[in-house]
Image: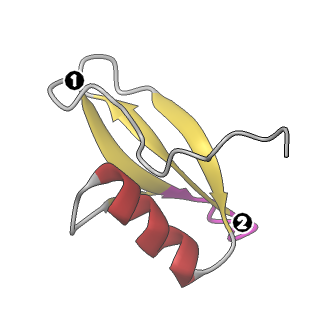
């Protein structure tokens, strides 16, 4: 009724950012986000709870392969 339609496409700077999944070595928690290619800093976008979440992140970014960092 009052909600907006959710946009299922992430926008990011494709020249300066790389999509990645960051995984904690200790807890196993995973987040999806982007690595700034110039500075190497990681920016969180969403929490990953299952493989389906990773597939959805790839779909939103428009990529087939994704880098995992620890």
Percent across and percent down for residue 14 are 20, 32
For the residue pair 46 and 43, the one nearer the viewer reads as 46
At label 1, counting other C-alpha atoms closer than 10 Å, the crowd grade (few under 14, some 14-19, many 20 or more) is few
Looking at the rendered structure, the secondary structure element under dot 1 is loop
Q: Which residue is mark 2?
A: 26
Q: Residue furthest top?
A: 39
Within the magenta stretch, is there residue 43?
Answer: no
Q: Magenta segment range?
A: 22-29
Q: Is residue 18 above or below residue 37?
A: below
The colour scheme used here is: secondary structure
For the residue pair 54 and 1, the one nearer the viewer reads as 1
Q: Quadrant of residue 17?
A: top left
Q: Which residue is mark 1?
A: 16
Q: Earlier in the sequence, mark 2 or mark 1?
A: 1
Q: Is residue 15 above or below residue 38?
A: below
Please report the residue visible at 37 percent of the width from the left and 35 percent of the height from the top. Answer: 35
Please report the residue visible at 58 percent of the width from the left and 39 percent of the height from the top. Answer: 44
Q: Is residue 52 above or below residue 70?
A: below
Percent across and percent down for residue 23 are 56, 61
Q: Is residue 19 above or below residue 68?
A: above
Please report the residue visible at 52 percent of the width from the left and 32 percent of the height from the top. Answer: 43
Give left or right: position of 56 versus 66: right
Q: Residue furthest right?
A: 1
Q: Quadrant of residue 4?
A: top right
Percent across and percent down for residue 52 are 54, 80
Please report the residue visible at 76 percent of the width from the left and 67 percent of the height from the top. Answer: 27
Q: Nearer the viewer, mark 2 or mark 1?
A: 1
């Amino acid at each position: 009724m009052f909600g907006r339609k959710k946009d299922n496409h992430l926008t990011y700077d494709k020249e300066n950012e790389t999509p990645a999944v960051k995984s904690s070595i200790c807890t196993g928690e995973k987040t999806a986000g982007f690595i700034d290619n110039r500075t190497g800093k990681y920016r969180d976008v969403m929490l990953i709870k299952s493989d389906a979440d990773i597939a959805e992140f790839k779909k939103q970014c428009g990529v087939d392969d994704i880098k995992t960092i620890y």
